[in-house]
Image: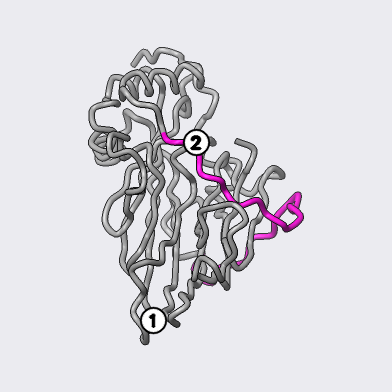
Amino acid sequence: MNRAPALWSAAVISLLVLSGCTPPPAPEEPVASETPSESPSASPSPTAEALPDDVVLVVSAVATADNGAVLDLTMTVHRPTAFDDPASAAAAALMTDSCGGGTDDSLYADQLWTFATVDIDAIARSGAAWPTNRRLFLSPFASYVNIAADGAVLDDDMVDPATPHCRTDKHLDVAGSGSMVVGLEGDTDDVSAAGQFTRWANQMWGFSGVYVAGQSAAAAGIVLSECTYTVTDAGKALNGGSADWIERIADERCLVGNPSI
């Protein structure tokens, strides 16, 4: 199959033109007060050997709301697959639907997209129910990549309703399971693609209890704890856990990845 080369900047311009709208301003990702570590040490996972071969990263945390409700959180990131891989069919269809016609198979082919599927699980512990006004925000943000959501993962409803769902940030506000599909342009193994399936590693991954820079965990009503992550061998082979990666671990957030974008 012949694939037309596409520069990253052209990909973004094409998406905006096709969707007919301007994406919302990028949310202020909280600035970490911690000193970034040059080579983060992933916490070992006792279940790492049981993970599917295509898993590249697992991030886990415990979220406690100010009413005492507790959720056990897990984010499982799967290896990106190319737009023309049969394994991408469902992900591509979800992205097309989420973008409201702003993207389609021809665009994915022209811009050499890959799709990374991300499983999200929020399991409630016994006790108080999770309050409806407490949101857990998921990274990466749609300011940097196109993201489609399914299941318990919800689209940001605080933006212009005309904004395509694939250009809105994602969150949880209830216990449950869902998924995200992250679209990565210029990422296939085509000779014209710069990514070579590594652009997932250019993002920050994980959970935030705050959405505005400078907000405290107490003000948000959510404290995150027991933040751990595992970069698998498959992830390391695709730039996961590289020297560019940092940890942002505090009461407000549980994030790991590359903040350079």
Q: Amino acid at mark 2?
A: Tyr
Residue 87 can be seen, yes or no: no
The answer to which of 103 and 198 lies nearer the viewer is: 103
Give the SS element for disc 1. Answer: loop
What residue is rendered at 46% in x and 75% in y?
65
Q: Main secondary structure of the magenta part?
A: loop
Task: Specify whether residue 53 is painted magenta.
Answer: no
The answer to which of 39 and 79 lies nearer the viewer is: 39
Q: Which residue is mark 1?
A: 125
Number of residues whose C-alpha sits closer than 10 Å to that of mark 2, classed few (under 14), some (14–19) or many (20 or more):
some
Give the SS element for disc 2. Answer: loop
Q: Amino acid at mark 1?
A: Arg
**Quarter occupied by residue 162:** top left
Query: Residue 161's x, y, as percent?
Result: 28, 39
Number of residues whose C-alpha sits closer than 10 Å to that of mark 1, classed few (under 14), some (14–19) or many (20 or more):
few
Q: Which residue is mark 2?
A: 144
Which of pointers 2 and 1 lies earlier in the amino acid sequence? 1
User: Can you say whether 79 is above or below 144 in the image?
Assistant: below
Query: Residue 109's x, y, as percent?
Result: 34, 21
Q: Give the color scheme: rainbow, by chain, secondary structure or one colour.
A: one colour
Query: Residue 105's x, y, as percent?
Result: 27, 24
